[in-house]
Image (tube, rainbow, N blue to C red):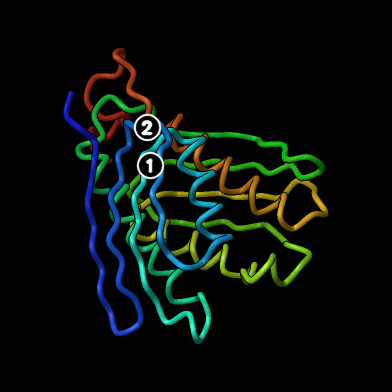
Amino acid sequence: MSKREAQVDRKTKETRISLNLNLDGRGETHLQMGVPFFEHMLNLWARHGLFDLTINAQGDLEIDAHHLVEDTGITLGQALYKGMGDKEGIKRFGFFVLPMDEALVMVSLDLSDRPLLVYEVEVPAERVGEFDTELLEEFLRAFVQEARVTLHVKLIHGKNSHHILEAVFKALGKSLDQALTRDSRIQGVPSTKGKL
């Protein structure tokens, strides 16, 4: 089996990001980004998806975290797409409903090569710590575009903003792990078209 790993570097006038992703990892992370809550969320994503993730990033945090969060979505999506390779033998679809105390979040996705985000999450608080909660949608939109994934994220219920965001990242990790799992019964790519 080929190794499913990718290195992506992105440099703009606003951010510098170096990211390494191993899709067949153990959930180990090394994150240096300067946005502690976002690092916490990515750590949860990697741990529950069983991905090894290393990110060294700098951004114009003196303005806010918007550019760094969005560009991390871009680089992580590119790494996922590159790391998947030809997608032969993968299950393709992933679905998880995750409880996080009073919060319940559903994530459903298709590694389809057709980027689409359906986002139905209303986070009660504008900020969790120093993190602007509307950046969750910006991150997911950038990630979906570059990973070429169809992604549905729905908050079923929840009141605590920290719990809601945590449930989204955990459920995304679990769903991706499911979709990326190889099944020896699948010959080629899982599509009647013969191509994703």
For residue 77, the mark is none
Q: CA distance from mark 2 to mark 1?
A: 8 Å
**Alpha-carbon neighbours of circle 2 within 10 Å: few (<14), some, or many (≥20)?**
many
Q: Is residue 117 left or right of residue 32?
A: right
Which residue is disc 2 drawn over? 180
- Estimate the x, y position of residue 77 in percent, counting from the top left: 35, 55
Residue 14 or residue 148, whichever sits in front: 14
Q: Position of residue 41 (x, y in %)?
A: 55, 52
Residues tagged 2 and 1 counted as in contact (Cβ below 8 A): yes
Quadrant location of the C terminus? top left
Return the residue nearer the eye: 161 or 59: 59
In front of the other: 79 or 185: 79
Q: Nearer the viewer, residue 6 or 56?
A: 56
- Residue type, label 2: Leu
Residue at 61% x, 48% y: name it: 168
- Looking at the rendered image, the quarter that the N terminus falls into is top left
Which amino acid type is shown beneath numbered disc 1?
Answer: Leu
Residue 53 located left or right of residue 118: left
* For residue 74, side relative to residue 122 (left or right): left
Residue corresponding to mark 1: 111
Q: Residue at x 46, y 56 (%)?
A: 116
For the point 30% across and 19% down, the residue is: 186
Judge whether 96 appears above or below 117 on screen: above
